[in-house]
Amino acid sequence: MEQLQQMARELLERQQVQVIIGYEAGSEANRRRAVFVRRAEDVSRLIFDDACRQNLATYLLKPEVLVLGKIGMVVRRNTLRSLMQYAVENQLADERVIAIGIGEEGGPRLLPNFAAVEEYLAQLPRGPSAAEKAELKKMEQLVMEQRWAFWREEFDRCIKCYACRAACPLCYCNRCITEVNQPQWIPVASDALGNLEWNVIRAMHLAGRCIGCGSCADACPQGIRIDLLNGLLAREAQQQFAAEPGYGQRKDYALAVFKPDDKEEFIR
Amino acid sequence: MARIGVFICHCGENIGSTVDCAAVAKAAGELPGVVHSVDYKYMCSDPGQSMIKDAIRTQKLTGVVVGACSPRMHEPTFRRACNEAGLNPFLCEMANLREHCSWVHEKLPDTTAKAIDLVRILVEKVKRNKPLSSIKVPVTKRALVLGGGIAGIQAALDIAGAGHEVVLVERSPSIGGHMAQLSETFPTLDCSQCILTPRMVEVAQHPNITLYTYSELESLEGFIGNFKATIRKRARGVDEKLCTGCGVCTQKCPNKKIPSEFNEHLGTRPAIYVPFPQAVPNKPVIDRDRCTYYSKGKCQVCAKMCPTKAIRYDQEDELITIDIGAVVAATGFTIKGTDFFPEYGYGQYPNVITGLQFERLASASGPTLGVIRRPSDNEIPENVVFIACAGSRDSAKRLSYCSKICCMYTAKHAMLYKHKVHEGRAHVFYMDIRAGGKMYDEFVRRAIEEDQVNYIRGRVSRVFERNGKMIVKGVDTLLNGQSIEIEADLVVLATAMTAQPDAEATAQRMKISYDADHFLSEAHPKLRPVEMNTAGIFVAGACQAPKDIPETVAQASAAASKVVGLFSRSELAREPVVATVNRTAPPLFSTCVGCFLCETACPYQAIERDDIRGRDGQLIRQVAKVNQGVCQGCGTCVALCRSKAIDLQGFTNEQVFAELLAV
């Protein structure tokens, strides 16, 4: 932690960045919240531990954050993957952010550009954790009817507060499809159909893009397992199309890229 | 308020016998917004079109729905009629009551109900149609002809003769194709080379034709009038400008034992070779896989002997990119080899040959100088058995089609053999004799009656060896299915004509459709036989289906006339069915977030990046923009766009949604 604060102080003092976005203690003992540190004397507010789960990348595309200048950001593995995905999706200029990589892999270390992030990510372990894998496996073992019943129950609780969308680093559209009303693809009401369409369409929009940070589920006040839904789709995209979003700068979105040599013989 | 007119066509009996058209028109008349609804026997006829035009004028229609056949068939007809009556053509839609309804269902009340549904869907759509205007695109008046067989040669000469530039690409070292291999041609028995080679020379000398042999199409991008073709000119190993075609290199090459492709492996050629003496261009190529210099690093005899020092061992493939307005695919065919037939010895018997090999034996320029000699010992065969339909019309061999030319060339082969070996006996096993065509049946009768070829109606079950003799075991179905055995010195299989082994890849490279047998699919089997579904690409010859020389030449000229027709205009009007990215007021400027994932999804590279700048020139945002000249309106980007910032003109989200809700 001291190392982290020292690094942040140096970045601010040397004016390499104008603001450091990191974590500070929250309102309760086990809660953390985002903090924007703009003065070197405030770096002591920065902390880092396992409770720092929020994906801070979400702030990077906000116009009010972009005007602050160059940004330093305390990032975990998943946040780094968000940065890479922003690079792929043309949302963030290179060297706009100096990432301070930290987490169970060690750190802190300075990652000044996309190339450095990519190189660092290449050394880290990939794929879901053992606990996540076990959960995915459990879902896959359910028969179709059971799975359908499970998700119907989950989506029944949705109140369409869109906290998932606000927390998600990849839900950055100016105009979300749920607000498109000519035509109204997603019914406005928070009823069975409206909830189903919202959650399914959001999951489809994240298939092949989701980097699995789980911020959506953390943000959901109803405890809906959105992370599980996205995890299942990510696994599908990985198995069917070898999609591993957030590890490189290449544009190979599974839903968009067509390879002539990748023949689906079964549809002939 | 919408004022929609609905016009239900009976299409003669096609729709009328299954769907109650009057009931459809009546139900449509009650839909909100519909002010006029009628049915008529033939809506596409002149009186039918007049009904539409009159209704537009008198009823002041704001949209038209024609319930008739497929829009592929008559949408242009009805849109033109609307235009003539002063209604924007894109305010006219078709409900497909034929292919989507009457042709696929029984005559039942439900069928009529479905027809009403289809009309209601289109009424809801047309209410949301907006007037559109065609997009004008320029035409590059240069044609690419792929394949230098008789089809490609004919198409190239016709287009060039009309005054347009032609780029002719042939992948083998010489043009000429299969026709150059043939001996005599049915039904007149005129010499194939004698009629073909003057055409080949004409191609080489024509000022409007650029010939690339030993070359292949690497890629084809763009659209009608505006293609960009990349051609890979493979390294010949010979400087074509210096080479005079004297032939010293081919005579001196020490490596002469390579089976000749031109002679169907019945003769040999050197490693540096011209496929045949009349080749165009008469410039040799080095077969790098077989040349001693490339494998061992030594030899260079050809380079030493060449009087003009034209040999270039280090020559590399060249990529040439050319702007093209239209393409004629004339990529030809191949045939099944004898190894395809386990029942006829799997290609193990040297004296079981294909029809094309027999052509080489019968040809004056062939390995035997036109004397029929069997491959095993060069003896003149006394008993020759010809087996028609070898592979063709055999669904067990996955070749259910008729190869069309075998009946004729088998009769010709038998005849040629009898003319050359007077005492010999020729037997033909056949399933049916298909000799439709001018002077064709007469030709077959001549073989049977004048030249006494023994025609046996029946199939051959096996060809095998017994005591050093080849036995053809078959059945004569006209003799009560009696089994017969014939001792043969030579067996000629009329093997099936098939698509080129890489036909599928070639078609995919050009983005044109092909059928299950990998023959190219024309746009309409009757009315658009030389056009492909991809606009600006035409087809000629046996790459589309098995066909003989007269048919091939006719189709090539037809394709050429289509190309010339296209080139008669300097501008083309394209349907405005293209994608557009929305623009909104500042500070957003567009709901596009600029993720450019659509860029990778677009199969036509039509998505561009548009910089939105402030008055000070500062970049505010980068959003997607569609190049309307390149966009083909496939809608892939529309489906992919998460925020629905892209829409397809003529098929907007709003229209499609209304259609869905109307079901």
Image: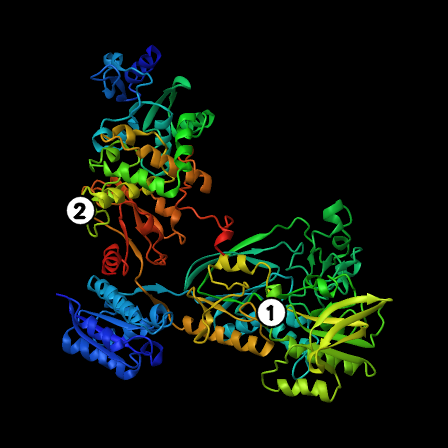
Q: Residues within 10 Å of mark 2 (few under 14, many from 20)?
A: few
- Residue closest to the eye, B139 or B193: B193
Q: Secondary structure at mark 1?
A: loop
Q: Which mark is residue B585?
A: 2
- Residue closest to the eye, B567 or B489: B489
Callout 2: residue from which chain? Answer: B
Along the polypeptide, which appears first: circle 2 or circle 1? 1
| A238 relative to B457, above or below | above
Give the side of residue B407 with respect to residue A42, left or right.
right
Give the Cα separation between the discs numbered 2 and 1: 59 Å
| B77 relative to B647, above or below | below
Q: Which residue corresponds to mark 1?
A: B149
What amino acid type should be assigned to the residue bearing mark 2?
Ala
Which residue sits furthest top? Answer: A2
| B238 relative to A120, above or below | below
What amino acid type should be assigned to the residue bearing mark 1?
Gly
- Residue closest to the eye, B21 or A216: B21
Question: Residue B645 at x, y = what percent?
Answer: 26, 48
Can you see residue A250? no
Callout 1: residue from which chain? Answer: B
Count the labels in the image. Answer: 2
Question: Residue B281 at x, y = what percent?
Answer: 64, 65
